[in-house]
Image: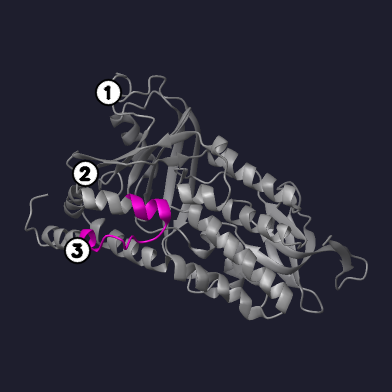
């Protein structure tokens, strides 16, 4: 349906009207806009210019299959993760028969937005300001196209998807619980990858391998989360996350770069942003707004993984709006969260327990890394990551892991 022009409560003002206005053009918003447009709805995708989220850029095979992502967008294929304990002990976790794809978020997000445009959505650059109501109760979305002007543009929206990231302004204005969600602060530096990318042979970066992700569970680098070195082909993300107030994220990244031999690599850009620690208990306002992505809190605890879950929530938000526009029943908007939690809630619950316990101290981190040596743990971890569900096909492996966990918890085995 083409966008129509209708009058709002000011007789001399004409604004465009859309079936859906999607605020935020990251993976969640762009996916939602694409699906809505493909279902014949008139869609405006509103995105801020120049913002790139700090992100490791890892995507699993299921994401590529489920959302038709071409392999040409991959800048690297990782087949090994190395976890590092406070004692500097290293444990390698190979991916048997598969790989984790790495993307550059600047390129990846732009491609997703362009796909939404090709599906029929209109893309505009602007910063969301507020939602007002027309005389008939329809939402009026006010946004500013440029920082250099105080003038606000306005569009009329039958429905709205808030996909404007953590600390979403859409969420804060429409979903009261959004103001209380806790966050981890994430910061990373995108650097030029060393020219020699074979582990152990480059004296300037002796610990770097462009086919391996390194994850550091050390309290000095992150007192409550982890630090990372994730290769992106020609570039590499070196970052850290923490919810601890006063902790120097930049200082931790500087230390990590020095220790890994990456301090001399060219710094291309620096980025920081909050990452939600908990999924919101409600994503919709019961009327015409539904959230997706970081705005809804769909980042996996413990790992901080968000791209797949953002796109999955964007698709579910779009499906709920299509149903609402067809039926007129606002209860359909609540189905986005219900369906997401049915599919992923148990995984988030398990990961949340893991983060709260194992990341609490260096002593526990040391034992956590020790557990990662176990072949059963490695196999089930990668299967769960690749396929985005808990693996139930090997009950004895789960039983073995359970008893090994207990042994580590009570200190029966040495770390």
* Distance (Cα) linking label 2 and label 3: 25 Å
Q: Quadrant of the N terminus?
A: bottom right
Question: Magenta stretch mostly in which secondary structure?
Answer: helix
- Mark 3 highlights which residue? 399
Q: Which residue is depicted at the point 46% across and 40% down?
A: 101
The stretch drawn in magenta includes residue 395: yes
Expressed as whole percent of the image width and height from the top left, the position of residue 397 reads: 22, 58
| Stretch in magenta | 382-399
Q: Check disc 1 and report its element: helix, strand or loop.
A: loop
Task: Name the disc covering residue 345, or none.
Answer: none
Q: Residue furthest right?
A: 12
Q: Check disc 3 and report its element: helix, strand or loop.
A: helix
Among numbered discs 3 and 1, the one appearing first in the sequence:
1
Tell me if mark 3 has few (under 14), some (14-19) or many (20+) residues whose alpha carbon lies within 10 angstroms of its own.
few
- Mark 2 highlights which residue? 85
Q: Is residue 164 left or right of residue 387?
A: right
Closer to the camera in the image, 88 or 30: 30
Q: Which residue is depicted at the point 46% across and 47% down?
A: 61
Among numbered discs 2 and 1, the one appearing first in the sequence:
2
- Mark 1 highlights which residue? 200
Q: How many marks?
A: 3
User: In the rendered view, would you say 285 is above or below 363?
Assistant: below
* Distance (Cα) linking label 2 and label 1: 19 Å
Expressed as whole percent of the image width and height from the top left, the position of residue 16 reads: 84, 62
The stretch drawn in magenta includes residue 36: no
Q: Which residue is depicted at the point 57% across and 68% down?
A: 172
In which image quadrant can residue 264 be found?
A: top left
Tell me if mark 2 has few (under 14), some (14-19) or many (20+) residues whose alpha carbon lies within 10 angstroms of its own.
many
Closer to the camera in the image, 72 or 110: 72
Which numbered disc, 3 or 1, marks the residue closer to the eye? Answer: 3
Q: Check disc 2 and report its element: helix, strand or loop.
A: loop
Q: Is residue 157 left or right of residue 191?
A: right
């Amino acid at each position: 349906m083409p966008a129509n022009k209708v009058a709002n409560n000011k007789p001399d003002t004409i604004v465009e009207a859309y079936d859906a206005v999607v605020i935020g053009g990251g993976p969640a918003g762009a996916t939602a806009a694409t699906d809505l447009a493909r279902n014949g709805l008139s869609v405006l995708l509103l995105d801020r210019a120049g913002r790139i989220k700090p992100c490791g850029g890892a995507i699993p095979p299921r994401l590529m299959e489920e959302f038709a992502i071409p392999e040409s967008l991959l800048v690297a294929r990782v087949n090994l993760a190395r976890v590092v304990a406070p004692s500097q002990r290293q444990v390698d976790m190979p991916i048997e028969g598969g790989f984790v794809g790495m993307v550059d978020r600047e390129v990846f997000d732009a491609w997703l937005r362009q796909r939404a445009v090709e599906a029929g959505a209109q893309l505009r650059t602007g910063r969301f300001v507020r939602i007002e109501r027309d005389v008939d109760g329809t939402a009026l979305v006010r946004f500013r196209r440029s920082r250099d002007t105080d003038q606000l543009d306005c569009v009329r929206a039958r429905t709205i998807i808030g996909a404007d990231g953590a600390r979403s302004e859409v969420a804060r204005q429409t979903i009261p619980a959004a103001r209380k969600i806790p966050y981890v602060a994430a910061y990373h530096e995108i650097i030029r990858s060393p020219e020699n990318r074979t582990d152990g042979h480059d004296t300037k970066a002796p610990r770097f391998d462009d086919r391996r992700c390194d994850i550091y569970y050390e309290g000095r680098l992150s007192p409550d989360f982890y630090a990372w070195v994730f290769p992106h082909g020609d570039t590499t993300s070196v970052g850290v996350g923490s919810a601890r107030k006063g902790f120097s994220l930049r200082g931790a990244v500087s230390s990590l770069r020095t220790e890994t031999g990456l301090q001399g690599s060219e710094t291309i850009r620096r980025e920081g942003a909050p990452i939600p620690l908990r999924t919101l208990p409600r994503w919709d306002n019961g009327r015409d707004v539904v959230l997706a992505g970081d705005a809804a809190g769909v980042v996996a605890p413990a790992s901080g993984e968000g791209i797949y879950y953002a796109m999955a929530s964007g698709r579910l938000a779009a499906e709920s709006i299509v149903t609402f526009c067809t039926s007129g029943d606002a209860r359909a908007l609540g189905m986005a969260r219900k369906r997401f939690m049915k599919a992923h809630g148990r995984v988030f619950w398990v990961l949340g327990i893991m983060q709260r316990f194992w990341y609490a101290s260096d002593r526990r981190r040391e034992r956590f890394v020790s557990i990662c040596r176990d072949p059963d743990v490695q196999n089930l971890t990668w299967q769960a990551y690749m396929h985005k569900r808990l693996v139930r096909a090997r009950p004895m492996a789960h039983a073995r892991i359970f008893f090994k966990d207990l042994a580590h918890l009570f200190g029966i085995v040495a770390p």
